[in-house]
Image (tube, rainbow, N blue to C red):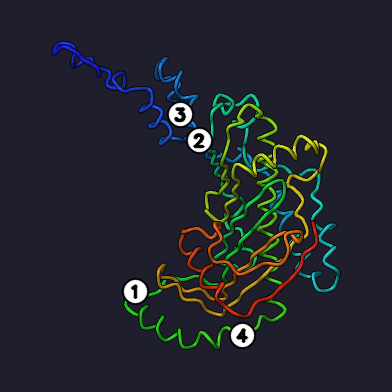
Amino acid sequence: MCYKTHEEYDDLAYFDCLPDALLLLIFNKLHDLKSLTYCLSVSKRFRSLVPFTDTIFISIPPLPKPSNTAASYINNTLRQVFHNLFLKPVRCFHRLMASPKSTTMSFDISCCHSNGVLRIFKEMKSLHLELPLHGAGELGSSNGATFLQWKADFGSNLKTCIIVGATSFQKCNTFSSSAIFSQRKEERVFMEETALNDDELKLRVIWTISCLIAASTRQYLLKQILADNPNIPMLERVVISDANKQGMFSMGKEELVEMRNSIDTKQEASSSSMERSPVPEVNMKLWYLPMLDLPDSGYVMKGATLILIRPVVDGMIENNSDDPLVGDEKPFSEAAREMIKVKKSYLMTMSSF
C-alpha cells in the first residue's frame, strides 16, 4: 500500500502505489505499440517495466508514397489467369506468378527490423500486426466480389485456408427478414442442386488466387521479422490482419517453431526473389449457393461461396464446421457453417505457384 499524509495527498502519484504485476497487466491490456512507446518516456519505472509486456499490437503505417507496382502486378496476373485458366494447364501459374524484381512492400515495417523498437520486447508472447489498406482497399472489389474474407493457418508452409465470398452482400430488412428466411428454407434443397457455370467457376478461382497471394505475402513478411528479431524466442502467437478485416493470417507456438527451423535451414534470404512465399500444390473444396440467408447476422448473400484449401500432402478435405479457423466472427463464421452443410461440392487441385 502507498500511504501519504493529508498535506501530501495532492502530490500523490497514484501509479506509484500500484504493484509491478498490476502495471504489467495494464500494459498488456493497452498492448498498442505506439502507446507503449509513449509510456517509455513517462518515468524510469515505466521504462523498466514496459519491455516486459508480452502482448503487442502494431498498426503498420503505409509508406508516404506507396508504389502501385505490386497492385498493378496482381491485377494483371489475375486478368491473365482469368483468360488462360481453362486454355492452358494449371502449371502456367508458375510463370504468371513470377513477381517482378521491382515489386516492393507498400507499407512501413521499420519498427519490426532488428534496430526497431520491437527489439526491446524480449518476453513478447503474442504479436498482432495490422496492415494498412492496400490500393482501393477491397481485395475482391475489382474481381466481382462484394464480400470476400479469408483466414489462413501457416507453419513453414500453408496448412489450411478458408475463404468465404459472395457477389452480393446486403443487410436484410429487419421487419421482413423472419418471413423471408422461413420462405427460403423451403427453396434450399432446390438451390443446393444449382451448378456453377464456367465463368462463375473461373471467378471463384480468381478469388482463391487473390487470397492465397495475400496470405503468402504475410508469411513472407513474418519470416523477415523473425529473421531480424531472433531475441524474441518466447513468441507463441502471431496474427497478421488488415485494416479492412478481409484476411487473417495466424500461427501458433508449434507453427512458429516450425517456421524458425525452416528459416535456419533454407536460408530465407536466398530462397526467392518474390516478396511472398511459394504456395504449395493444394486441394480445394468449394461449396456454392445462389442465395444464402444469415439470420443471426441479418444479411443475405448472393453467389455465396465457401472454399477450403489444404496442401495435397495432407490428403483430401473432410467437412468440418468445427475447424478452429472458422471462429466466431459473424457473418464469416455463420456463412461457413451454413455452407459446409451443402451436400454438393466441387473438388479441384491447384499446382504450386
Tag 3–tag 2 contact (CB < 8 Å): yes
Q: Quadrant of residue 101?
A: top right
**Marks 1, 2: nearer the viewer:** 2
| Residue placed under numbered mark 1 in the picture | 174
**Residue wearing tag 4:** 194
Q: Is disc 4 placed on a helix, strand or loop?
A: loop
Residue 323, position in %: x, y?
56, 60
Where in the figure is residue 216, as x and y percent of width and height?
69, 50
Closer mark to the observer between disc 4 and disc 1: 4
Q: CA distance from mark 4 to mark 1?
A: 28 Å
Q: In this figure, which residue is indicated by the disc labeled 3?
A: 36
Q: Amino acid at mark 4?
A: Thr
- Count how many numbered circles sit on residues in the image: 4
Give the mark, 4 or 1, whose residue is nearer the N terminus: 1
Q: Earlier in the sequence, mark 1 or mark 2?
A: 2
User: 10 Å neighbourhood of mark 3: few (<14), some, or many (≥20)?
Assistant: many
The reply, left or right, for residue 202 in relation to residue 148 is right
- Mark 3 falls on what kind of element? helix
Badge 1 amino acid: Thr
Residue 56 numbered tag: 2
In three-dimensional space, the C-alpha distance between marks 4 and 2, rounded to whole angstroms, equals: 46 Å
Real-space CA distance between mark 3 and mark 2, rounded to the nearest whole angstrom: 9 Å
Q: Nearer the viewer, residue 317 or 329?
A: 317
Side of 278 where 203 appears, left or right: left
